[in-house]
Image: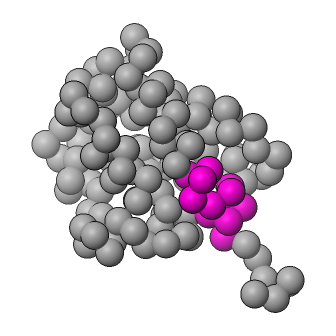
Amino acid sequence: MSLNQELSPYERIGGDKAVRQLVFRFYELMDSQSETQHIRAMHPDDLSLSGDKLYKYLSGWLGGPQLYVEEYGHPQLRARHLPFQISQAESDAWMLCMNTALDELAHDDELLISHLRQSLRQLATHMHNQ
């Protein structure tokens, strides 16, 4: 890669290790906060598979390896979430966990984190089906 090529968000955030940390903390927060229990209840008791799927999805979404696509095919996020009631309250709870996890990455690229927050908010809003 030449020095003048722009790095992907995956590379800018810190690659595999950072994505894993983000997802681990995201689910840890969802599992422990009273204000997110309504979305926690949508998940299985064991969050391992959910965490693995989010990690694989975010890796590709951020411009890294397309792990989710390789294993599961096209994400079809909206279709996969249709069995769950998702409104503003659910996306707000999801974003509460994601924003806190992003804050705790202690990443110095404020422009990247701001862009990720905005893009993830759009993604969470796209899941609304109520």
Q: How is the image coloured?
A: one colour
Residue toward you, 53 or 128: 53
Toward the left, the furthest residue is: 83
**Looking at the rendering, in which quadrant would you find the C terminus?**
top left
Q: Residue at x 48, y 38 (%)?
A: 24
Q: From what the image shows, is residue 15 above or below residue 122?
A: below
Counting the numbered discs, the total is 0
- Please, which residue is most extreme toward the right here? 3
Give, as a single range, the part of the protein colored magenta: 8-19
Is 101 left or right of 30, judged from the image as shown?
right
Residue 85 visible? The answer is: no
- Where is 115 relative to 26, above or below? below
| Figure quadrant of residue 48 | top left
Q: Is residue 71 magenta?
A: no
Q: Position of residue 53 (x, y in %)?
A: 33, 53
Q: Say above or below: 81 vs 130.
A: below
Q: Residue at x 73, y 72 (%)?
A: 7
